[in-house]
Image (tube, rainbow, N blue to C red):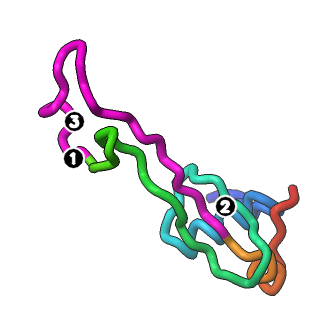
Amino acid sequence: MASEPKRKMPTGYRRTSMIVRDYLSARGSSYPILVVPGDSPPAMIGRSYGWETRTGIIIRHPTAYAKRGWSSMIYRHSTLRIEVGSEWLSVRGLTMED
C-alpha cells in the first residue's frame, strides 16, 4: 500500500490563527484576531449579534414582538473578536505575518 503524504503544518498567519483559536476552543470560527500590546492571552471580546429595543433591552424572540410596518426593534451586529497580546505571541515564536 502506498502511504498518504503527510500534511504540512501551516506557517505564519494560518499557524498562529490555528493556535490562538485552539487556545479558546474556537476552531472554525471567523472572528477577527487583533494583536494588542502586552502579554495577555487570547480572549473573546465584544457582544454577539441579536435584536434589542431602542432602550437597549435584549429581545430573545424577535418574531413574537414584530408587527407589520411598525417595530421598536433594532438589529445589533456582532462585535465579537479575539484579542491577543503581542508579547504572548512572541514568547511562543508566533507571528501574524504571512
Crowd around label 2: few <14 · some 14–19 · many ≥20 (10 Å): few
In the rendered view, tell whether residue 30 sits above or below residue 12: above
Residue closest to the eye, 38 or 8: 38
The quadrant in which the C terminus is found is bottom right
Q: Is residue 63 visible?
A: yes
Q: Are marks 3 and 2 in contact (CB under 8 Å)?
A: no
Q: Earlier in the sequence, mark 2 or mark 1?
A: 2
In the rendered view, tell whether residue 50 sits above or below residue 92: above
Is 70 part of what is drawn in magenta? yes
Q: Is residue 6 visible?
A: no
Residue at 67 percent across and 59 percent down: it is 33
Q: Which residue is mark 1?
A: 60
Residue at 24 percent across and 13 percent down: it is 69
Indicate the amino acid at tag 3.
Answer: Pro
Q: Which residues are magenta?
A: 59-83
The quadrant in which the N terminus is found is bottom right
**Quick one: SS at disc 1?**
loop
Q: Is residue 11 left or right of residue 22?
A: right
Please state the horizontal and vertical placement of residue 66, each as a whole percent of the image.
Answer: 19, 26
Indicate the amino acid at tag 1.
Answer: Arg
Crowd around label 3: few <14 · some 14–19 · many ≥20 (10 Å): some
Q: Which residue is mark 3?
A: 62
Q: Nearer the viewer, mark 2 or mark 1?
A: 1
In the rendered view, tell whether residue 7 sits above or below residue 75: below
Residue closest to the eye, 74 or 60: 74
Q: Quadrant of residue 52?
A: top left
Q: Which residue is mark 2?
A: 3
Residue at 29 percent across and 33 percent down: it is 73
**Quick one: SS at disc 3?**
helix
Q: Earlier in the sequence, mark 3 or mark 2?
A: 2
